[in-house]
Image (cartoon, rainbow, N blue to C red):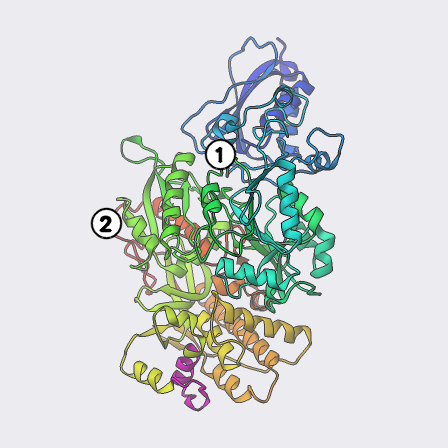
Amino acid sequence: MEDGKNKIMTEQIRVYGIVQGVGFRPLVYRTAKEYGIKGLVRNVGGYVEIVAQSESDLIGRFLADLKDNKKGGHEIMKMEAEEIPFMDLEDFAILKSESMGEISVIPPDLPVCPECLRELSEESDRRYGNPFISCVSCGPRYTIMEELPYDRKRTTMEDFPLCSECQKEYTWAAGRRFHAQTVSCNDCGPYLIYHHKGNGPMERKEKEAFEKALTVLSKGGIVAVKGIGGFHLVCSPFREDTVKRLRKLKGREEKPFAVMFPGIQEISRCCLVSAEEKALLESKARPIVLLSIKQDTMAPSVSNESIYCGAFLPYTPLQHMLTKRLGPLIMTSANIAGQPIIREDESMLALSSPYLDGVLYNQRRIVRSVDDSVARIIEGMPQLIRRSRGYVPYPVFLSRGEGSREEGEGGTKTGIFAAGGDLKAAFCLCQKGNAVVSQHFGDLEEEAVRKEFQRSYEDLTRLLRITPGLAVCDLHPNYHSARFAEALGLPVLKVQHHHAHVASVMAEHDLKGPVIGVAFDGTGCGTDRSIWGGEFLVCEGIDFIRAGHVSMFPILGGDSSMRDARKTASCCLLHAGLTAYIEDERLEVIKAALEHNINRVLTSSVGRLFDGAASVLNIGHENRYEGECAVLLEREAVLGERNRVKPVSLSFGIKEQDDVLTLDPRPVFETLCTMRNRAETGALALGFHLALAQAVASVCKRLGSRYLSNTVALSGGVFQNALLTRHTIGLLKKNGFFVYLNSAVPPNDGGLSLGQAYLGNEYLKSGIRDLERTGCHVCCSSGKSDSNKGGLRKD
């Protein structure tokens, strides 16, 4: 052997990232063969191990090629290499996977790739018309994986033995299906099955099943179609009678339906599509993207007068086949009246409804339910509204820092379980700085959703090999998620709701603080046990100060307060001394209940302000789905802005008491009441949004000077409002602030668990160890916490 760069050496390399289930080992094999490198590659628990033997400069170029490769679905986050003693190697080989106690970065489900699409449509190809075509670069991953390492025998594809031709492709090193665990064809399955719900033959198979489904859909029927993470309910968006039947089937009154289009060109006929929106639509995640409608050619009940269309592109071969033949299709999750999405064949086949015509399915098992993700573009950047398929279980990487606790008693590895909230439930598992947020589950008020939540917790802790040593949950004593965390028998860290919202932004962008966090939403339990929802928090480490908020106002509590916007408006106007403008026959009852403290609660909720404003302007009086009145208020404001109406000037009062700033909404409601019959509704709705944006900027400017911070984090469900967010960001930037939003997780309660995990991680890094097994750590409004180390200060 020679010295220098031509020395023959043997290196052992560990590659971390999305490197299992995405064709990375075959890529390593082919690249090594190109360079004449001897060695091996294998999956080892949470990473890929490579042994490479060659001249040192060739190994360096080999590794550089792997890092720079833009093909396929892999993503390298870290490489560790060390020279090992010389080994007698004759060739390069892919070895059998080994299971180790390491956390793996599991790949999300991937959309069908262009090469497979080409084969799907070529009559000469042996996979022509195969609805399950895939290769190393595409196909289901997370939803079919039963355990790690990722090999066919550990997925639900093990139920379908490879035919001789597929076996050849699986072992042919130069091919696209070399070690592709989802490889299949028309001979070895899976196969399509159509189950008819009406009269006639009950079941048809393969091509006959597909044609039968096409016939039913083309005649205005509704068919349940099995996808990657569960069933969809599918029908034409152009037939009003069909869409109304679909609403009855789902028990969904008014919320708009998502529509799957064959391609970008078809979407562009209906919607405005920017370059950023096109990129998001075509991204590997293939989310539903909220787009502005420019020409609504579909049935009225699809969007129900919404100015946005939830549009998305096909991501499975079967979806491509259906939309190619039928054009745009409503493709909505098969969950009935708030229940989890149906993933099991037996449950779908057993569903009895006069509105469902048939089921198009296959016998490939779905291990875990995963709904479609929903996103939009705000200020040129993606914002997730629901994080599921295509994103889960890709982690958010938190700063581990010095002093973070990696081992518990006896050397046992510990992790963090963050329970999230009850609405838009999603939990987070975190270890060694890897924070994996689960798929969206729905509302934990539903027993079936709670069972799915628990099943998924058990599933993911096993799959990721995480044993939590700390549970983090919301401060609310009656949250189902908090009760679940407390029942685990672990030390419990309780986190204020809006602090977790702001912390989720800090986690994504590695913000160190002090950070001015603006958290606007509907409800969240405050440290004083009142209902917060319009908060200005100054955050650093595990501490926060409630430095400002919407002034507290009384409403009548209970579930009806969330739905009844007219009642909320009456409460707001009574509090503002505007009784003469109340149009509610229940006025005396509401007034008496407030005066006698019957079901009366104090809140600072911006969500309730939106409800009140929408009702005062006669835009909406009832939330038939979550946030409907706020959506309708935004709609009027956006239309007003598009039509270039002059906004009515409104303003919030800003007061200060005991170093806390408050936003007083009374002047806003007074103007809305006095001007609602004299100005255009759009001008008033737009004025409301602009006034709130200006108030946020004004408060942040004062807090920035006081706490020496030029960093603002915006979070909470209200910041799904694109108009409000856009104007708020613009004003903050004019005042010299750096503004950060959620991107990897939603700003709504679907992102809470990431913020909780971040605060749990910060707690472990802090070195504090006085948390009792059943105790809690609560940050309080004074800026001091029961573990405060000095932290926040004013100038």
Quadrant showing the C terminus: bottom left
For badge 2, the amino acid type reads: Thr
Which residue lies under the disc numbered 2?
A: 774
Quadrant showing the N terminus: top right
Q: Is there any visible trace of residue 320 in the rendered image?
A: no
Tell me: residue 593, above or below residue 9: below
Disc 2 is placed on an element classified as loop
For badge 1, the amino acid type reads: Met
**Numbered badge on residue 145:** 1
Disc 1 is placed on an element classified as loop
Magenta highlight on residue 584: yes
526 or 58, nearer to the observer: 526
Residue sticking out furthest to the bottom: 580
660 or 29, nearer to the observer: 29
Separation of marks 2 and 1 at Cα, in angstroms? 35 Å
752 or 79, nearer to the observer: 752
Where residue 121 sits in the image (x, y, percent)? 73, 37
- Picture residue at 33% right of the left edge, 57% below the top: 479
Where residue 577 sits in the image (x, y, percent)? 40, 88
Where residue 581 sits in the image (x, y, percent)? 46, 89
Q: Which residues are magenta?
A: 568-586
Where residue 4 sits in the image (x, y, percent)? 63, 16
